[in-house]
Image (spheres, grey):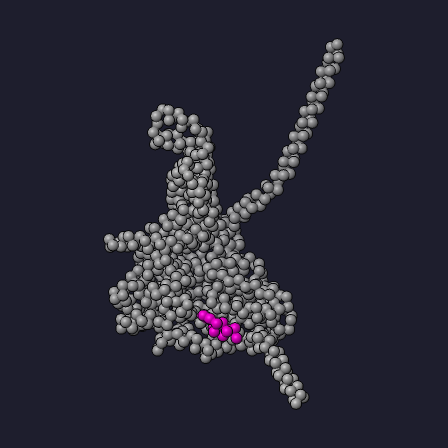
């Protein structure tokens, strides 16, 4: 009897030991195997990224990465405007202060032309530093992955979160007024008028503040929808500015009218933080803005409209439907001194496990791995919207239809051009200038910039 | 006797010469010691101000863009000629001086009134004097954020309470920072709130150090309070007022943190002063050559303005 007891006890102890041994293996499964052999013990990594739900969540799991690899990660998160200024100063000064940096498609052309970014292909193809199971390149969404490649097809960054725009609307207000979400620009104007008249409240929230990443993130939906464009033939290197076309002027006037008549007070100065919090406070019945805001809209601890939001594609114009597109990822600067160690961090931070874990701990709706978006727990958590106005399928549709040159970002003078158009648009919104005058003036200004930069015009 | 006297005179003369020589040597040693102590300070001053200024001027003659390693080439006065054609630059320069005039004028006026009030002998005046300096110790970014919140049409009290008062009459206040006509005024008010205590302190200290005899004579002669203020106080305060005007003018024309936080140069270009435009050109678009040329022009204007004011100030002090 005693020997039977001893055998059972031995079995239990063995079982517990096996489980305890398996736990570290399970925890470090998301860390590349190429980082677990102790070669990076004591290495200090400096990482700088945008302050964003995805990065704040990644930062929460960094101690696991540190424990598994022996590295020490110093992670700095900054707001968008300050981040890019700091990054450009560091890169142009070739300080080598950071090993992993935030990489946006907006900066792709400028940074690649300047030779600041290290190619990732040599690392990807080196099995001594890449765990192909953890990296799983084929699991990334195609458009985000391609947006961080150079013209030469070489990979320079891996996508961390993508962005597109949706029309989000208050289900209760629409049901009370018997309205359906607008599908065209004119329906949008009519619906806004209807809501304003019947509720005496703002109908729509849009970005008004000047900037290529602010009002010029939203406005091209209207510009292109009305048949306008920035340049004569951008993808084919004809940089003749055409913002003084009648279509562009009309688009500016239309956008300004929406804000002047139907947006909350002060919308002319709204950046994305203002638009998001305004909608969450119930300040407007509709908003056209980033799809990833849904995580905040549907968080009952933050939002007054949680559970009352429907999602649909941005309205279309006579020339089509043009949702916005943006992509943000991670890259290794050429001056980084610890490229291999940096690559281990990137593989881990963008792995399936970390993306899923952060999405489930959330809010982090924007993920870049297809398998995460198909995960049952993810779909259950981000089951926003209702009926045909559910967030996830609409978001996927929007991302798939977005034009890569929605904003013609892929040349080094985009910032100056985009900001200039943003200023002109804000002047129209504020009522300082007519759309006619503002667009003519900005077109002249852009012409000067393009001529000075020596970019090709005409064919 | 004479020879002994002559010898003594010569000895005395010789002794005097020795003394003078010793004195001269001592003075030279003192000069050398002084130079030795001054040189580090001069080197540091040159290092942090003169050398960067020379580098800035040098950069202004290049077409340097930080994102293009091949662009650091000399282009002579090309940037300056380009600036002459840049209407956005002239607009921003005009705004900088508009801001300077508005904020400095208001600070002087309000600062003077506050200084006179705080100079009164009242119970608890010391506490009021201490409280009045609080805005001055806040960082400009914090001041900008405070006023951005105050002006906010959605969460700010100014908009809320003014609309509560005027809405029964069918009127509605527009957001201050959202319209061109009032956006710069909003920034000016925040700057006045921050720096009036500085002006007040300087004028208060001057008031407290003014001689009392003119006042006693005026009292005897039966002058009214207004006459005393206009004909005695103000003239004696003039040098201090000019000095504080010079200091505030030079500082205010370089305004940046408040604009960055409150308006980002908008709406449109309504608050885009030359400092902000230079920041965009240099640190956002990375055209450091062009931005340097802008800053050099600004620097030259401020230097000329300061020289004119300083000479006017010196004349006033001499007349006083």
* Span shown in magenta: A353-364
Q: Position of residue A31 (x, y in %)?
A: 57, 73
- Residue occupying image coordinates x 65% and y 70%: A39
Q: Position of residue B112 (x, y in %)?
A: 40, 38
Question: Observer-nearest residue: A325 or B144?
Answer: B144
- Residue occupying image coordinates x 65% and y 84%: A10
- Residue occupying image coordinates x 46% and y 61%: A80
Say if B220 sits above or below B251 in the image. above
Question: Observer-nearest residue: B26 or B143?
Answer: B143
- Residue occupying image coordinates x 74% and y 15%: B7
Say if B59 sits above or below B247 in the image. below
Say if A322 sits above or below A448 in the image. below
Question: Observer-nearest residue: A44 or A124?
Answer: A44
Majority secondary structure of magenta residues: helix
Magenta span has A356? yes
Magenta span has A382? no
Q: Position of residue A19 (x, y in %)?
A: 60, 80
Q: Quadrant of residue A446?
A: bottom left
Left or right for A17, reference B114: right
Q: Quadrant of residue A397?
A: bottom left
* Residue A272 visible in this rendered orientation of the protein: yes
**Residue at the far front in the pictured view:** A1
Left or right for A75, reference A420: right
**Residue at the far top in the pictured view:** B1
Q: Position of residue A55 (x, y in %)?
A: 50, 67
Total numbered circles: 0
Q: In what quadrant of the picture does the N terminus of chain B appear?
A: top right
Q: In what quadrant of the picture does the C terminus of chain B appear?
A: top left
Question: Observer-nearest residue: A399 or A224?
Answer: A399
* Residue A442 visible in this rendered orientation of the protein: no
């Amino acid at each position: 009897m005693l020997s039977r007891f001893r055998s059972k006890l031995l079995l239990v102890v063995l079982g517990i030991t096996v489980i305890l041994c398996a736990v570290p293996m399970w925890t470090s499964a998301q860390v590349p195997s190429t980082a677990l052999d102790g070669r990076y013990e004591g290495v200090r990594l400096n990482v700088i990224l945008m302050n964003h739900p995805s990065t704040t969540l990644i930062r929460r799991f960094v101690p696991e990465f540190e424990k598994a690899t022996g590295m020490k990660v110093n992670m700095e998160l900054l707001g968008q405007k300050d981040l890019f200024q700091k990054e450009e100063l560091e890169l142009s000064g070739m300080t080598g202060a950071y090993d992993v940096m935030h990489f946006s498609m907006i900066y792709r052309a400028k940074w690649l032309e300047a030779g600041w970014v290290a190619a990732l292909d040599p690392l990807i193809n080196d099995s001594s530093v890449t765990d192909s199971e953890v990296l799983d390149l084929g699991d990334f969404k195609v458009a985000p992955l391609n947006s961080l490649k150079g013209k030469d097809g070489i990979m320079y960054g891996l996508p961390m979160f993508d962005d597109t725009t949706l029309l989000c609307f208050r289900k209760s207000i629409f049901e009370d007024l018997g309205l359906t979400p607008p599908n065209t620009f004119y329906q949008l104007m009519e619906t806004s008028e209807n809501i304003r008249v019947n509720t005496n409240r703002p109908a729509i929230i849009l970005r008004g503040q000047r900037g290529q990443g602010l009002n010029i993130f939203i406005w091209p939906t209207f510009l292109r929808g009305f048949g306008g464009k920035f340049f004569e033939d951008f993808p084919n290197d004809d940089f003749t500015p055409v913002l003084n076309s009648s279509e562009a002027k009309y688009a500016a006037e239309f956008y300004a009218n929406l804000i002047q008549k139907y947006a909350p007070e002060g919308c002319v100065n709204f950046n994305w933080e203002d638009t998001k919090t305004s909608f969450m406070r119930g300040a407007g019945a509709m908003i056209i803005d980033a799809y990833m805001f849904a995580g905040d809209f549907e968080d009952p601890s933050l939002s007054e409209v949680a559970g009352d939001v429907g999602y649909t594609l941005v309205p279309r114009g006579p020339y089509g439907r043009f949702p916005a597109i943006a992509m943000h990822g991670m890259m290794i600067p050429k001056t980084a001194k610890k490229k291999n160690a940096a690559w281990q961090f990137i593989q881990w931070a963008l792995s399936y496990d970390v993306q899923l874990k952060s999405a489930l701990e959330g809010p982090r709706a924007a993920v870049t791995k297809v398998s995460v978006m198909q995960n049952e727990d993810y779909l259950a958590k981000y089951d926003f919207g209702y009926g045909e106005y559910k967030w996830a399928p609409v978001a996927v549709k929007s991302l798939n239809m977005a034009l890569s040159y929605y904003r013609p970002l892929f040349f080094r003078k985009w910032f100056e051009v985009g900001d200039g158009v943003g200023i002109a648009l804000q002047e129209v919104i504020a009522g300082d200038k007519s759309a006619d005058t503002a667009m003519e003036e900005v077109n002249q200004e852009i012409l000067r910039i393009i001529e000075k930069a020596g970019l090709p015009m005409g064919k | 006797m004479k020879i002994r006297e002559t010898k003594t005179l010569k000895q005395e003369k010789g002794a005097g010469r020795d003394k003078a020589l010793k004195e001269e040597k001592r003075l030279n040693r003192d000069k050398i010691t002084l130079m030795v102590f001054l040189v580090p300070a001069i080197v540091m001053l040159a290092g942090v101000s003169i050398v960067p200024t020379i580098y800035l001027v040098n950069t202004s003659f290049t077409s340097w863009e930080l994102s293009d390693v091949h662009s650091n080439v000399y282009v002579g006065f090309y940037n300056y000629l380009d600036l002459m054609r840049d209407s956005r630059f002239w607009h921003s320069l005009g705004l900088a001086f508009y801001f300077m005039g508005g904020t400095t004028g208001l600070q002087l006026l309000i600062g003077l009134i506050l200084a006179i009030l705080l100079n009164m002998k009242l119970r608890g005046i010391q506490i009021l004097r201490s409280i009045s300096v609080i805005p001055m110790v806040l960082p400009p970014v914090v001041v900008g954020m405070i006023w951005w919140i105050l002006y906010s049409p959605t969460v700010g009290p100014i908009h809320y309470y003014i609309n509560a008062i005027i809405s029964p009459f069918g009127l509605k206040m527009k957001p201050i920072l959202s319209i061109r006509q009032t956006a710069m005024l909003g920034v000016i008010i925040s700057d006045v709130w921050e720096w009036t205590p500085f002006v007040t302190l300087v004028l208060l200290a001057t008031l407290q150090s003014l001689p009392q005899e003119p006042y006693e004579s005026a009292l005897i002669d039966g002058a009214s309070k207004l006459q005393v203020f206009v004909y005695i106080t103000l003239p004696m305060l003039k040098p201090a007022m000019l000095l504080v005007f010079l200091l505030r003018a030079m500082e205010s024309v370089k305004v940046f943190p408040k604009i960055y936080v409150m308006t980002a140069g908008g709406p449109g270009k309504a608050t885009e002063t030359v400092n902000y435009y230079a920041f965009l050109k240099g640190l956002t678009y990375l055209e450091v050559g062009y931005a340097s040329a802008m800053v050099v022009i600004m620097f030259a204007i401020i230097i000329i303005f300061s020289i004119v004011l300083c000479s006017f100030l010196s004349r006033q002090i001499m007349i006083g």
